[in-house]
Image (tube, rainbow, N blue to C red):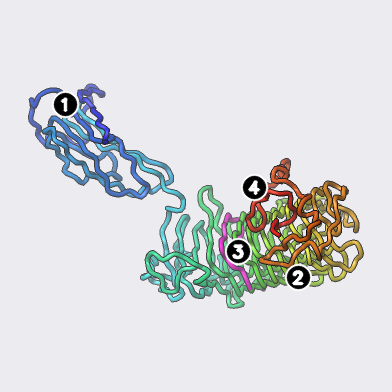
């Protein structure tokens, strides 16, 4: 039942003031219809409208003829502006435009009988969300450079859309292959790339012949950004950081980049190196990548991703495969913050260090790496060290629920940690499994701290079943780079043939061949009835307490599940709690 609200009007709120709105003399009103002026609303005299606006109505009764107007441009009265005022119910129709901003707004519709006898309908509108802002551009491989790109029917080129797009705009990509032809700002011929200069969204995965209303599905609709083995960076991100907006990229495959140049150039204060980031380079920006594939890129130094100079990049459900280079063939995080969630890093090959991830900073800027639920497999650092991950000077590294296997190099085949007195390095492993990695010429089959300025902390993890040519160096070479030493913090973890509760307290024997099951879906299930990894691990409450006192931002929800998202309800070690 609609609530009846009576608003008795005999108001003299502003004595001596005259309305600056529509002059009632333009619409003469009869006098003496009896009693004081009165408005009656059927329903609330306050209307809440959605962020996108639309058509609305309310009902009113009055005992004398009345006028009506909007006090705000975004509210437009569409019904008759003169009411009968004979006591019958009359409908007021009005439209509201889309809210253009991120703040709620309010306005009014004024009704009056005389200047002193008036009532208001209050209109309040919800704010837009960030995702509602901006212009949509539509792009096809055969789009026209002179088209406006405002629909699939008038699709433009990717270069044209990137040039036109500003903060909050969205670029939608139809399936197919796109090859960059524009030169990176400050570059020269040979420095071709797709350049993201503003905090926009780049969304691939639409059908090859899309129509209005289609949604992206990158699994079915491959959207390929290809450098044709020539582009110095296939995709370069140089958007300045903004308090409200950031770069978003999803559903694209980045391939065949070749960062084979020398020298560098500055964009928005960040250095873009011509020998790094053959596939993707991020310089001084904040960016999120989802469901992307970075594959088959090469570099004189780094081939896949180069995350540079205070960039804040997050990757979710992405694949980094078959990239080549020297140091950090797949990923080099250089004085930035890099977060990887549920990502695959596989079959990347380098001639230098850190074939999977190379986390290294200089100039006093901390280089931060955060990996959750990742699979790091079959990467090779050739004749050097850090087959999977190399945590170097000035870096903080946190691995949670990660499986690291099948990686190889001369020494520290799984993960290497190296710091200096001026720029120490730290690695914290929580609920990880490191197995099947091979040091081909020295020690450190699984994890190695290369010197006294590196720190290794292990919680609820398994490092076993790795190999090296140095006896005792198959699995973990701990503090100070000495074979036989243990991590600085060792809690409820397996190293080689022993399961530890804390420090050097052994709680059971572990045999990798009989207690780690065959690889399945990127994880190694735990098997064996006497397996201490199934019973001597940490409880969810103990896991949640680990970040206390850490400088790194560790999310509690990442600690209480395993690599596949299963809840950790029992005391099970390693990346995967399943059997």
**Residue 285 belongs to magenta span:** yes
Quickly name the residue at label 2: 380
Q: Check contact, mark 2 vs mark 1: CB within 8 A.
A: no
How would you rate the neighbour count of disc 3 (Cα within 10 Å): few for under 14, some for 14-19, many for 20 or more?
many
Taking the image as shown, residue 112 lies to the left or right of residue 402, namely left
Q: Nearer the viewer, mark 1 or mark 4?
A: 4
Is residue 567 at least partly visible in the picture? Answer: yes
Measure the alpha-carbon separation of dots 2 and 1: 87 Å
Where residue 357 appears, x then y in whole percent? 71, 62
Which residue sits at x=65%, y=70%? 321
Secondary structure under tag 2 reads loop
Q: What is the secondary structure assignment of the residue under circle 1?
A: loop
Mark before the other along the chain sequence, 1 or 3: 1
Labelled pair 2, 4 in contact (Cβ < 8 Å): no
Figure quadrant of residue 531: bottom right
**Disc 4: which residue:** 555
Residue 324 position (above or below residue 70):
below
In the rendered structure, are the residues bearing label 1 and label 3 in contact, judged by CB atoms less than 8 Å apart?
Answer: no
The residue that label 3 is drawn on is 318
Q: Nearer the viewer, residue 304 or 571?
A: 571
Q: Nearer the viewer, residue 414 or 165?
A: 414
User: What is the magenta range?
Assistant: 281-295
Q: CA distance from mark 1 to mark 4?
A: 62 Å
Q: Which quadrant: the C terminus? A: bottom right
x and y, in percent, of residue 148 in the image: 38, 67
Q: Secondary structure at mark 4?
A: loop
Give the crowd class for mark 4: few <14, some 14-19, many >=20 residues within 10 Å: few
């Amino acid at each position: 039942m609609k609530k009846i609200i009576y608003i008795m009007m005999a108001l003299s709120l502003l004595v001596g003031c005259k309305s600056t709105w529509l002059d009632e003399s333009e619409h003469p009103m009869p006098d003496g219809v009896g009693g004081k002026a009165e408005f009656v609303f059927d329903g609330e005299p306050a209307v809440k409208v959605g962020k996108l606006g639309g058509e609305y109505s309310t009902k009113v009764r009055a005992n004398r003829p009345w006028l009506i107007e909007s006090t705000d441009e975004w509210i437009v009265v569409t019904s008759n502006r003169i009411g009968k005022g004979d006591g019958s119910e009359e409908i007021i129709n009005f439209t509201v435009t889309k809210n253009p901003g991120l703040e709620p707004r309010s306005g009014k519709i004024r009704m009056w009988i005389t200047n002193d006898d008036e009532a208001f309908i209050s209109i309040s509108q919800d704010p837009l969300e960030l995702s509602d802002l901006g212009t949509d551009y539509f792009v096809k491989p055969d789009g026209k450079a002179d088209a406006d790109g405002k629909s699939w029917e008038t699709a433009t080129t990717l270069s044209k859309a990137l040039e036109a797009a500003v903060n909050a705009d969205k670029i939608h990509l139809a399936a197919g292959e796109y090859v960059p032809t524009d030169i990176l700002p400050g570059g020269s011929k040979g420095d071709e790339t797709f350049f993201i200069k503003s905090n926009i969204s780049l969304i691939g995965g639409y059908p090859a012949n899309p129509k209005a209303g289609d949604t992206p599905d990158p699994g079915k609709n491959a959207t390929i950004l290809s450098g044709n083995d020539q582009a110095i960076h296939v995709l370069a991100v140089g958007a300045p950081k903004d308090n409200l907006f950031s770069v978003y990229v999803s559903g694209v495959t980045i391939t065949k980049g070749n960062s084979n140049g020398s020298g560098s150039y500055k964009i928005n204060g960040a250095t873009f190196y011509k020998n790094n980031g053959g596939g993707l380079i991020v310089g001084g920006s904040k960016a999120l990548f989802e469901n992307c594939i970075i594959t088959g890129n090469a570099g004189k130094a780094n081939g896949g991703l180069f995350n540079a100079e205070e960039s804040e990049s997050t990757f979710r459900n992405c694949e980094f495969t078959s990239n080549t280079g020297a140091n950090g063939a797949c990923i080099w995080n250089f004085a930035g913050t890099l977060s990887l969630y549920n990502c695959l890093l596989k079959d990347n090959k380098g001639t230098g260090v850190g074939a999977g991830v190379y986390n290294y900073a200089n100039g006093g800027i901390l280089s931060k790496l955060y990996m959750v639920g990742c699979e790091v497999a079959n990467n090779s650092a050739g004749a050097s060290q850090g087959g999977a991950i190399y945590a170097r000077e000035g870096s903080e590294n946190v691995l949670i629920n990660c499986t690291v296997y099948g990686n190889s190099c001369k020494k520290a085949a799984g993960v290497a940690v190296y710091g200096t007195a001026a720029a120490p390095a730290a690695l914290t492993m929580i609920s990880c499994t490191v197995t099947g990695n091979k040091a081909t010429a020295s020690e450190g089959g699984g994890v190695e701290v290369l010197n006294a300025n590196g720190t290794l902390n292990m919680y609820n993890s398994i490092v076993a079943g790795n190999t090296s040519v140095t006896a005792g160096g198959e699995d973990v070479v701990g503090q100070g780079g000495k074979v036989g030493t243990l991590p600085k913090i060792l809690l409820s973890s397996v190293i080689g043939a022993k399961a530890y509760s804390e420090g050097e307290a052994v709680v059971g024997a572990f045999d990798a061949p009989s207690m780690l099951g065959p690889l399945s879906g990127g994880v190694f299930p735990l098997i064996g009835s006497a397996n201490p990894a199934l019973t001597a691990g940490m409880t969810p409450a103990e896991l949640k307490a680990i970040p206390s006192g850490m400088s790194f931002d560790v999310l509690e929800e990442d600690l209480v599940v395993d690599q596949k998202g299963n809840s950790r309800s029992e005391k099970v070690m390693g990346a995967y709690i399943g059997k």
